[in-house]
Amino acid sequence: MTYEQCVAYLHHPPRFPKIPSLDRIKMLMGLLGNPQESLRFLHIAGTNGKGSVAAMTASVLTVAGYQTGLFTSPYLEKFEERLVINGVPISKPSLCKHTLHIKQAVEQMEQKGIQLTEFELVTALGFLFFKEQNCDFVVLETGLGGRFDSTNVITAPIASAITSISRDHIRVLGENLGQIAQEKCGILKRGSCAVTTATQDPEVLEVIWNDCSNKKILLEIPEMPSADQIWTDLTGTRFFWQDTMYEIPLLGLHQVENALLALQLIQFVREAGYPVSIQAAKRGLAEVRWPGRLELVSQHPAVLLDTGHNPGGIQMLGRALQDYFPNFKIHTVMGMLSDKEYRHCVMEMAKRSERFYPVAPPIPGRAVPEEVVEELAKPFCRDVQSGWELETILEREIGTLACDQLLLICGSIPLVGAARTILRRTLPIK
C-alpha cells in the first residue's frame, strides 16, 4: 500500500460506533500484542485546551531529555501531525508499516463481524509507533470523549488532566455540562493522580471532585496567578507561578490555565520518580508550538487563525480579539461542521465582524452549507459575502487589508488547516 492508500484506509471506517464500548479496541490491541501496556502515559481529556496542554507537557518532557510521544487529534494540515515524537511527526514509511500490521488484525476481526472506527485504528497506530520508538512517556489526548474513548484502553496513567469543559458533541456525550463532565471523567483511574482547572463551571467541578473522591484519586487544582502576575502581548504570555516566571509563545489568557495544568502534570511526573528541572519546564513552555490556535501568522497584514468551533472556544476567541485587537476591523472567514453548535458560534462571530465570508469546510457530508452560514450571519453583519472560493478570499484580503483591519480565519479545524496551507505560499509560516 502507498502512503495515500494507507491514510485512506485509516479514514475509511465510520467515525462513531453503533454501540459505545472498549471491547473492540481491547480486542484489536490484543491481536497487536498490547503495545500500550509497556508505555507510560499522561492522559488528557476535556472540551477546549486539551491539545494545548498536551503540546506543552510533551515539549517540557522532550526538553528534559525524555523520548516523548505526543498523540493528538484531529490534524491541522497533515495526518502525520497526530503522531509525534520529540517534535518530529511519524514518517510515511513508518506509518505504512504499522498500518499494514493493523490491517491484518482488522481483517481477523471483520471475519467475526466486528467493525472498528477510524479513531480506534489511529489509536492502535499510535501505540505501535510509540512502542517501536521506545518512548519514555506518551502524552495522550483523547478524541471527543473519555469513558469509551479508544485511548481509554490504557491502564492507570501517571496522571490525567481534565481541561475546560463546555457543550460540544452533545449528540454523543450528553445534553448538559454534568453529563459531559461525567463522560470525560471516565479516563480517571484508581492508582493515578488528576488535575483540573480552577475556572471550571461549578457543576463540572463537583462532578470531577466526586469522581476523584469515589476512586480515591488525588486531585490538584492549581490556583491561577493574580492579574498583576500575568503579562500578555502579540509575542505571547508571561506569568508567575510558584515564585517562577514562565513564558509561552501562545496568545490568549486561557493559555495560562492550560500551562498550569501542564506544569502540574510535570509535577506528578517528578513525584513518580522522573526528574524534570525547573529550567526544563521553563524552556519547554517557551518553545511549545501549537499551530492554528490563536496563531498570528502575519502582523503586516494582520492575519489570525483560530480553531475555536464550540461555544467555549468562540468565547475565548472573542476575549482574545478584545485583548489583542481592540481597535481593528475584523474580516472573518468562517466555516463550521454540523455536529457542533454552529448557530451560536456563527452569530457570535458575525456580531464582531465588519465583513464576513461564509465558507463550507472541506469535509463532505459534515460541513454546514455555505448558504446556511450566510443566513445566520446576515442579521448581525452588514457585509456578508458568499460564493467565493477560499483561495480567492485569502488572495483578495491579503492584497487589500488596511493597517487597522484583521483577517480572521476561524471555525472548523479542516477549514483553518486548508487556509494555513494556502497562506504559507505567500506568508513566512513555520
Image (cartoon, helix red, strand yellow):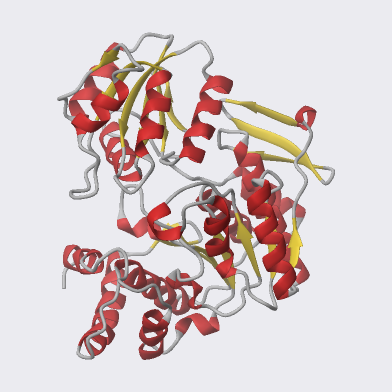
Viewer-proximal residue among 262 and 64:
262
Left or right relative to 228: residue 190: left
Which quarter of the figure is the N terminus placed in? bottom left
Q: Residue at x 41, y 19 (%)?
A: 351
Which of the 4 image quadrants contains residue 341? Answer: top left
Left or right relative to 218: residue 404: left
Residue 113, placed above or below residue 160: below
Q: Residue at x 47, y 57 (%)?
A: 174
Residue 340 coordinates in the image, percent (x, y): 37, 45
The furthest residue to the right: 243
Is residue 166 among the parts visible in the rendering? Answer: yes
Viewer-proximal residue among 92 and 50:
50
Residue 227, placed above or below residue 74: above
Q: Residue at x 22, y 37 (%)?
A: 360
Residue 186, placed above or below residue 164: below
Which quarter of the figure is the C terminus placed in? top left
Residue 368 coordinates in the image, percent (x, y): 25, 40
Q: Residue at x 78, y 45 (%)?
A: 223
The mark total stands at 0
Residue 65 coordinates in the image, percent (x, y): 63, 64
Residue 238 coordinates in the image, percent (x, y): 69, 34
Viewer-proximal residue among 231 and 132:
231
The furthest residue to the front: 175
Which of the 4 image quadrants contains residue 16? Answer: bottom left
